[in-house]
Amino acid sequence: MTTINWLEETNKLKDELIATTQEFLRIKSVLDPATAREGAPFGEGIRAALDFALNVCEKAGMTTKDVRGYAAHAEFGQGKELVGILSHVDVVPEGDGWSTPPYAAEIVDGKLVARGAIDDKGPTMAAIFAAKVVMNLGLPLSKRVRFIFGTDEESSWQCVKTYFETEEMPTMGFTPDADFPLIYAEKGLSDLTLRQTYAAFQQLGKPVAEQAEAKLVSLQAGLRMNMVPDKAVATLTPLSVDSQTIIDRYRKHLEQTGLKGLAEEKDGSVVLHMEGVSVHGMDPKKGVNAGTELIHFLRTLALDARAAVYAEAADRYLHKQHGGEALGIAHDDEEMGALTLNTGVLEYAAEGDALFRLNIRYPHSISFAKWSAILAERFGEAAFELEVVEHLTPHRVDPNHPLVTTLQRVYTEQTGEEAGIIAIGGATYGRSLDVGVAFGPLFPGRPDSAHQRDEYILVDDLVKATAIYAQAIYELAK
């Protein structure tokens, strides 16, 4: 058989690819509970985007199935085995500050600019058009190829959870929603809450702190478990020292540490503000946790009994403890990297609940059961109970699996570059498949504009990725 020039074949569809992608991106497919209904559980915009993708697939000759609006699929080819391509049609809210309208999908300096351009509507359309290339060439396939479209990837993943309750699991597959060359391994992800109720604290039987300088009334830091808090605020009632003494100590602390913050007296209370640096929770050491830094200062004060227990636990186990070292759960893995611990939310109410919300990511070589038991034991000593909010086990495909080696070969043949494989601390749709990896569309060296203002994909990269996906689909399904 004559060697196929995949980029040349893709370029025959280039104008249609760009125009269809622009039309797709002009649909505002943001989660909208106000317009949710049966068949559109996440709102009318997402439903419209799902219908659009299915319509493109139907026109190309694929058969489609809608799974109650939670997800849908489009399929072509024949055979017992199934190759899955999993992407999503929902996008995050657009935010402010765009230089072009976020749903205009304008091309500016070779960039297709729109919310969803790189995450994940641009790549979704690239994969569909890749299938059109294969179908137009009339190439024989021995497997079925199925596009699975999710609708809730940017929030709770209910889409794929619902889909796989009733639908066939692909033999293997990939998601075009990450980086090239290929992501084959993802750490386990856990969102945890450590909660100490007022009643649980009282059962500790701690004596009243007779020489307390201040009572901690409340503390709040952070909004999401998977982000390092960049702001924290604590309210104190002065006891054996006056307000100005606490304020002066805090200002001196800020000066000595180089941290930024503010102290003020308000209605007889002292309110302390701390500024940090927010980064993604997968690598918390790159940020500055405003919550644990503020508690680190509070530990220099003689606090009331309950606040002292809360602050001591936070300072010992969470302040600058990005790998769980003090807890005794630190673990490094040559392949996936180290366990990471992010304290994303800290809350304290003097007569209410005191809690820490953690995001912990861990490699496959340590079990969730092992490290979570240690965590529960350590914090249990201070009357905190562990609640598992969400837990995803580590995901890994054998580097020698044909899925991995085939996609590596395709990438190398198309780009002339070595196709290394990557392990990450984040989560892609690849982990929704029993045997799934993440494959593009972001090329090495390209800045990642996902979730940012002026999100974009280079038009040339969209076309190039389509050609890579076309060969990948053929090689996996031939």
Image (cartoon, grey):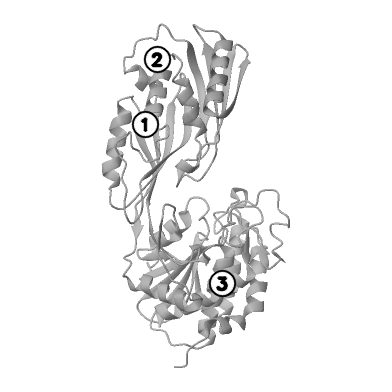
Secondary structure type for disc 3: helix
The answer to whether residue 95 is left or right of residue 353 is: right
Q: Residues within 10 Å of mark 3 (few under 14, many from 20)?
A: many
Earlier sequence position, callout 3 versus callout 1: 3
User: Image quadrant for the N terminus?
Assistant: bottom left
Q: What is the distance, in whole Å, between disc 3 and disc 1 at their CAs?
A: 46 Å
The residue under label 2 is which amino acid type?
Ala
Q: Identify the image quadrant of residue 167.
A: bottom left
Could you tell me residue 381's position as x and y percent?
30, 25
Q: Residues within 10 Å of mark 1 (few under 14, many from 20)?
A: some
Pointer 3 residue: 126
Could you tell me residue 60's position as x and y percent?
56, 80
Earlier sequence position, callout 1 versus callout 2: 2
Pointer 1 residue: 317
**Residue 189 visible at all:** yes
**Residue 67 visible at all:** no
Q: Residue furthest front?
A: 256
Pointer 2 residue: 305
Q: Residue furthest right?
A: 100
Identified at 47% across, 87% down, the residue is 139
Cβ–Cβ under 8 Å for marks 3 and 1: no
